[in-house]
């Protein structure tokens, strides 16, 4: 089974640029999308409920902004569209669901790069998200994937020194991510690729960052201890980022549970 996460930077634009070609090439069984930036009815009809897919949408209330979706080849049982039953998710940043006996979450953490106010929103979300990760069922295999908007170590960013005071690579953000790993979550791309530079998943539109592969690794697929034995391999599909989005799709292959 292949799980893919992708920040598409606007699904309507991605469709026009050739989104389907890359999905056909990558062949996900489960697809986690972030920054959809559209309500389902705004998409071409064939993408509102694609043939062969079950779909859950969580659009933002603000038009053309944020939003997440899960597409699965098998039925999806939605758990919630928020971090908790008492939480509001007006920006459409999370979907938690069960698919084939596995708990999944599609996550899009806020960026803090545009203003101090948005950094405050991001840090509030980070605190709530850690409470969420700590409270997930430990006996059920679980994967969550998405744009976390944090590069964990210097291996996850090309210009580390120049970005030490930049949102997404601030010391306390990196510590936050590290504590999440220490609590029992597994960064599957890093565990598969080892202690190499990258592979990056996001590139600035400035200069020739994408062409020269001078990026950040901020898109992740993580799993809990119960899911770790299922893990087989992980890939960052950079070629899709060169054509479709400023983010690359990230995939993990896991053993098929046959349920």
Image (cartoon, rainbow, N blue to C red):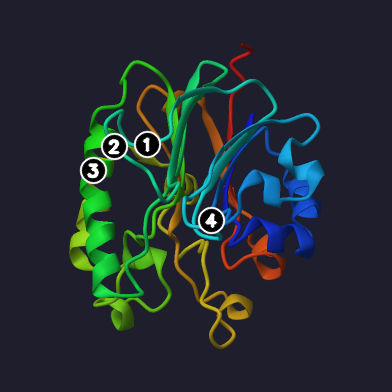
Answer left or right for 68 relative to 134.
Answer: right
- The residue indicated by pointer 3 is 128
Quadrant in the picture for the C terminus: top right
Q: If you read the primary sequence from the N terminus, does the residue marked by circle 3 or circle 2 appear first?
A: 2
Instruction: Label 2, secondary structure: give it.
Output: loop
Q: In the figure, 134 relative to 45: above or below?
A: above
Q: Which marked residue is nearer to the observer: mark 3 or mark 1?
A: 1
- The residue indicated by pointer 1 is 82
What residue appears at the point 48 percent right and 50 percent down from the top-left corner? 60
Distance (Cα) linking label 4 and label 3: 20 Å
Answer left or right for 103 relative to 126.
Answer: right
Distance (Cα) linking label 2 and label 4: 20 Å
Answer left or right for 110 relative to 135.
Answer: right
Crowdedness of circle 3 by 10 Å Cα count: few (<14), some, many (20+)? Answer: some
- The residue indicated by pointer 2 is 87
**Closer to the camera, 17 or 63?**
63
Answer left or right for 73 relative to 115.
Answer: right
- The residue indicated by pointer 4 is 35
Query: From this viewpoint, is residue 156 visible?
Result: yes
Q: In the figure, 4 relative to 167: above or below?
A: above
Instruction: Label 4, secondary structure: give it.
Output: loop
Question: Is the residue under label 1 in contact with that under label 4 (CB below 8 Å)?
Answer: no
Q: If you read the primary sequence from the N terminus, does the residue marked by circle 1 or circle 2 appear first?
A: 1
Distance (Cα) linking label 3 and label 1: 11 Å
Q: In the figure, 247 relative to 144: above or below?
A: below
Distance (Cα) linking label 1 and label 2: 6 Å
Residue 88 image-quadrant placement: top left
């Amino acid at each position: 089974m292949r799980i893919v996460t992708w920040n598409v930077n606007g699904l309507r634009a991605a469709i026009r640029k050739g989104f389907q070609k890359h999905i056909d090439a990558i062949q996900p069984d489960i697809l986690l999308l972030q920054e959809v930036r559209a309500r389902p009815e705004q998409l071409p009809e064939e993408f509102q409920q694609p043939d062969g897919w079950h779909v859950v949408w969580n659009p933002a209330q603000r038009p053309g902004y944020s939003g997440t979706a899960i597409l699965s080849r098998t039925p999806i049982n939605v758990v919630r569209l928020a971090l908790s039953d008492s939480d509001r998710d007006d920006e459409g940043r999370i979907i938690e669901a069960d698919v084939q006996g596995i708990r999944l979450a599609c996550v899009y953490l806020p960026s803090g790069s545009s203003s101090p106010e948005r950094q405050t929103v991001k840090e509030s979300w980070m605190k709530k998200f850690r409470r969420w990760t700590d409270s997930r069922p430990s006996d059920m295999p679980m994967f969550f994937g998405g744009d976390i908007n944090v590069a964990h170590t210097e291996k996850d960013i090309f210009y580390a020194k120049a970005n030490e005071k930049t949102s997404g690579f601030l010391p306390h953000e990196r510590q936050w991510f590290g504590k999440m790993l220490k609590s029992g979550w597994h960064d599957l791309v890093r565990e598969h690729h080892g202690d190499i530079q990258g592979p990056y998943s996001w590139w600035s539109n400035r200069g020739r960052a994408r062409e020269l592969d001078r990026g950040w690794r901020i898109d992740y697929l993580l799993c809990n201890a119960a899911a770790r034995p299922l893990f087989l391999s992980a890939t960052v599909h950079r070629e899709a980022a060169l054509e479709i989005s400023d983010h690359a799709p990230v995939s993990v292959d896991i053993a098929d549970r046959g349920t």
